[in-house]
Amino acid sequence: MAGRIRQADIDEVKARTNIADVVGERVALKSAGVGSMKGLCPFHDERSPSFHVRPQVGYYHCFGCGESGDVYSFLRAMDHVSFTEAVERLAGRIGYTLHYEDGGATPETSGRSRLYAANAAAAEFYRLRLADPEAETARRFLGERGFDAGAAAHFGVGYAPKGWSALTDHLLAQKFTREEITQAGLVSQGQRGVYDRFRGRLVWPIRDVTGQVIGFGARKLYDDDSGPKYLNTPETPIYRKAQVLYGLDLAKRDMARGEVRRVVVVEGYTDVMACHLAGLTTAVATCGTAFGAEHMKIVRRIIGDEQSAEVVFTFDPDAAGQKAAVRAFAETRTLNAQSFVAVGPEGLDPCDLRLQRGDAAVAGLMHAKVPMFEFVIDQRIKGLDLSSVEGRLAGLNAAAPLLADIRDEPLRRRYEHVLARRLGEDLGDVHREVERARRRSAAPDSAPASAPRDGKPVADPVQDPPALRVTIASLPRDRDTALERDALMAFLQYGHRLDTDIVDRALSLQFRHPALDAVRAAVQSAGDRGRPGWAADAVGSVREPFRSLAAELLTAAFPARDEVHAIASGNDLARRVLVRSLEREKTELLGAIQRVPAESEEGRALRIRLRDLDRDRQRLLEVE
């Protein structure tokens, strides 16, 4: 068995990988200053971006929860893989061949890589079986819904043969074990052993945001199939239906770009296919479960949490669709992004709409969308006799709490107008009832500690830094501390581009703030600042409780117009640190000179040193 991966390969893979690309598959990143990007933290729920990524140094840090690290630690935390698997995954991503040291320790693995591999092999098996004569019914099913062979190939659609062990036999021949196949959810357990979970069905591979196959959704094709119409992979170490959105791997890029960042949430696999083929390339669907909080977190990280972003749901106009809308509303009501509902004409879902009226009709759903609040309000007052005082009062009592949860005050006031028109009530009466509902939700005995109050979110306890944690924000606001802080930011972020001699001299001087001096000592000990990953290693070597501060200094936005000015500023900060030290020493020398005879040997030595200090200081100032 191969030993551990050669360290040179580990360093090379990290150096060749842009951490922003890896993080950007899960988090919508935007510029946060020179060389810095930021987005919503994937490690805790937040409404304002505090997660910073600095691609040039290959490091990330969340100023809210304190999580930080390099691209390997990001993959390990997000995908729960071992270090070895993280390296192997990134190496495969860039096409780099790894070398293993013979006789080294057996590499640490989590087993998850084998589950990914088993699912990938199963997806390929199903894809190839779609061309078999037995799959004629599956191909006809696709064709009747407007999907040709090209569409099937684009989405990786396949066919599971009718036999009890076709996939099992294939995977065993591929050297997967029965335990691995079972753990991946590809087989079911019966009295006589395991058998293929999907048999005689049309199969869609379900991929995570990075494009790796983690499970499958399968549709019944034959009348003698006694199973459910749709059957999904069960919960596995890599498949959690509450955290999966079908089509996200294809939609994520378009979701995070363009003038309007938008995600379209539909109800099924064929609806996702129809939307993408019709030009709505940001369509996704849940997998066997209702749209919930975990789905909302995934969406928010990719499209951001800005009012210009949109989440559009396509629900059937029947009772089930109305209930689904209300559930979805519960997850989106605290979202800054705008949420809408789009109902197809005559209640047609996107797949049937495309089949009957063409691609343009599917794309037109975005023109027919209505705000989620209006849709849900209409569901709340539906069936009430609004011609009676009692009916209007019941409608107001039912709808006011919905409006009370809207955080944006101008938007809330506009919806008060909408509700007043719907009910035929006076706007002032509606406003007073909404305000009463807001006060009730803000009452200490009726709201959890983290619930929004008075339109503002209460501090999330996850984000509150521990008492011992030192942060940039907690540093004193004096000139000396500011100089040391900015100098260390420059050294960590641009140390490989700064004047080596002057930075080395600055790092040799003790800093006045103890936390910043701890960071300085680690940076000084880091060695070669031209080595890829040196800054991340320096941060990792900072003693606690100051390591989080070092991570902030490495990832915070450096105050400069561009990289050229950042480098110039970094060199200037190093010189200012030196000048400060020289001026402090000069003050001490002047005091000493007053205490010794001018013509003594000690006095002459002090004056020579004072002259040298002035020359050194002048040289530093002339460079400025």
Image (tube, rainbow, N blue to C red):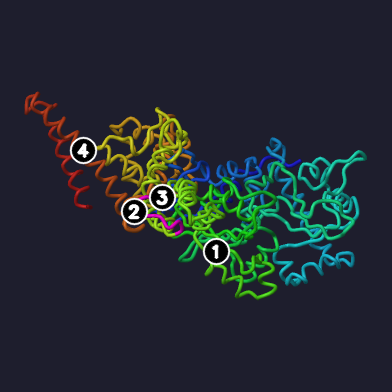
Eyeballing the image, is 470 above or below 263?
above
Q: CA distance from mark 4 to mark 2?
A: 23 Å
Residue 172 image point, x, y percent: 86, 48
Q: Nearer the viewer, mark 3 or mark 1?
A: 1
Residue 451 image point, x, y percent: 45, 38
Residue occupying image coordinates x 85% and y 41%: 189
Mark count: 4
* Residue that numbered label 4 is attached to: 582
Q: Reading the chain from its start, which is encountered first: label 2 or label 1?
A: 1
Residue 540 image point, x, y percent: 48, 37
Element at label 3: helix
Residue 254: give its label: 1
The kind of residue tagged 4 is: Leu
* Residue that numbered label 3 is attached to: 496
Report the side of 503 relative to 205 (left or right).
left
Residue 567: give its label: 2
Q: Quadrant of the N terminus?
A: top right
